[in-house]
Amino acid sequence: LFWHNAEDFEFSQVNGIILQKKTCDFWNKIWNFQAKPDDLLIASYPKAGTTWTQEIVDLIQNDGDIEKSRRASIQLRHPFLEWIRMTHLSGEYKTS
């Protein structure tokens, strides 16, 4: 994780589960997430090789082209559903 400011250290709970406050603030959006037919969801336990799996899937999706897989960090290419990042686009903030 990349901690940027004090807000990143704020925690709250959803149904008794302690999560980052930013995640709790957007829980309804996360809970109501609807995958598209062509979405691929990777689910694993923490420290079970999730990042390796993300990299392998990205290589498969790009026919093994390593340069295409270097286009952005893994967090941008295959974001975690529960990690909330705010990006500034065209004067509006949106979650990604």
Image (cartoon, helix red, strand yellow):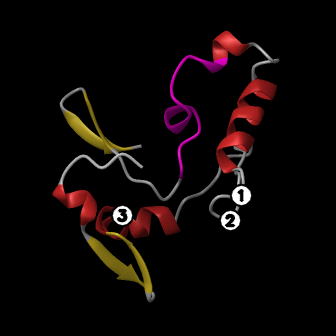
Magenta segment boundaries in residue numbering: 69-80
Q: Are marks 3 and 1 in contact (CB under 8 Å)?
A: no
Q: Residue at x 53, y 54 (%)?
A: 81
Quadrant holding the C terminus: top left
Instruction: Give the image location of residue 54, x and y in percent.
Output: 69, 40
The residue lying toward the viewer, choosing from 51 and 81, is 51
Any mark on residue 26, and which? 3
Spatial CA span between label 3 and label 1: 26 Å
- Which of the 4 image quarters holds residue 10? bottom left
Any mark on residue 31, and which? none
Q: Is residue 46 left or right of residue 7?
A: right
Secondary structure beneath label 3: loop
Q: Amino acid at mark 3?
A: Phe
The residue lying toward the viewer, choosing from 96 and 11, is 11
Q: Residue at x 51, y 23 (%)?
A: 72
- Which of the 4 image quarters holds residue 8? bottom left
Q: Amino acid at mark 2?
A: Tyr
Q: Is residue 93 left or right of residue 34?
A: left
Task: Using the image, determine if residue 34 lies above or below residue 58.
Answer: below
Q: Amino acid at mark 1?
A: Ala
Q: Are marks 2 and 1 in contact (CB under 8 Å)?
A: yes
Q: Is residue 86 left or right of residue 42?
A: left
